[in-house]
Image (cartoon, rainbow, N blue to C red):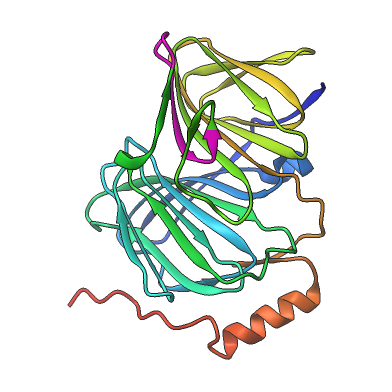
Amino acid sequence: MTIEMSQTLAVKDGRHGQYLKVKSIDIDKLGQMASPICLFDDFRVSGRPFGPHPHAGFSQITYVLRDSIGGNRSRDSLGNDIVVAPGGIVWTQAANGMLHQEVPADPTHELHGLQVFVNLSERHKFVAPRVLHLESACVPLWQSPDGDIVRVVVGSFGSVSSPLAPEEPFDFLDIELRDEIVFHLVQGRNAFVYVLQGRVSIISEEWEHEVSSGHAVALTGSGNLTFAASSPSNFLILSGLDIREPVLAQGPFIVNNRQQLDDVLARYRAGEMGHLEPISDR
């Protein structure tokens, strides 16, 4: 069993709109090993800097980090209007296309979260859209005798499984590490690791590497990985299909080729992704 690693120490910081601060992991530096993740932003936002906008061809995830002051409100053209508190997740499987808007649940309270774009393989890229969500209190936990805690937000870890079931297999694990855990990387899937706090050593049969807060690595291959805490740490493991297909990304659409993009744009312009009125404060 061999596991290879790609890493990025570079992030792009920016401020936009009313108040939006984004720390973006440079996915291009991670290459194919990052698949199916196409975008990963650690953001802080207040107010309502973005109105309704379309998505198609992928799933958009918003995970509200547990240190966030406020929650996330997610609205869409399917008729959903969902609020999740810190520790909760909204999984928007846009697929064939929908309109979407996310804002802080209370515009006066800062929302700290992660925005992740997860590509869909061509066989599922244009299935019917749907939205999944899970409140923090409903996220199942795996715990070790040494005090390690794995929040199984999506997918499974050990004998613990999340109730969320997206179209394609995916693990989203939020881990509080005091000692060590072992994660099994399945053949045909990649893993993306992002450290929120502390320092974590990743150990395979061939190598060992330490990852510090704000940095990410991508892993591919198959076999067991040991994650050991260099200090009390909080990190994420996101693991999904290694999709080896052409990717054409334009704005809010992720497709395989120009014909698909033209079709998506035509559906959007024809109003076939539904309608979503902007939020009114009146």
- Of 172 and 72, nearer the camera is 172
- Of 204 and 200, nearer the camera is 204
Q: Which quarter of the figure is the C terminus placed in?
A: bottom left
Residue 90 at x, y percent in the picture: 42, 54
Q: Measuring 65% from the left and 81% from the top, which residue is drawn there?
A: 265
> Left or right of 201: which side holds 140?
left
- Of 35 and 158, nearer the camera is 158
Q: Is residue 216 above or below residue 146?
A: below
Q: State the residue lying farthest toward the left.
A: 282
Q: Measuring 71% from the left and 82% from the top, which residue is drawn there?
A: 263
> Left or right of 193: which side holds 263?
right
Q: Quadrant of residue 158?
A: top right
Q: State the residue lying farthest toward the bottom.
A: 270
User: Is 146 colored magenta in this rendering?
Assistant: yes
User: Is 216 colored magenta in this rendering?
Assistant: no
Q: Which quarter of the figure is the N terminus placed in?
A: top right
Residue 223 at x, y percent in the picture: 74, 23
- Of 188 and 68, nearer the camera is 188
Look at the image and give the residue range highlighted in magenta.
Answer: 144-156
Q: Quadrant of residue 249?
A: bottom right
Residue 47 at x, y percent in the picture: 30, 60
Q: Is residue 61 above or below residue 251?
A: above
Q: Quadrant of residue 233?
A: top left
Q: Measuring 43% from the left and 73% from the top, which residue is drawn there?
A: 52
Residue 83 at x, y percent in the picture: 30, 57
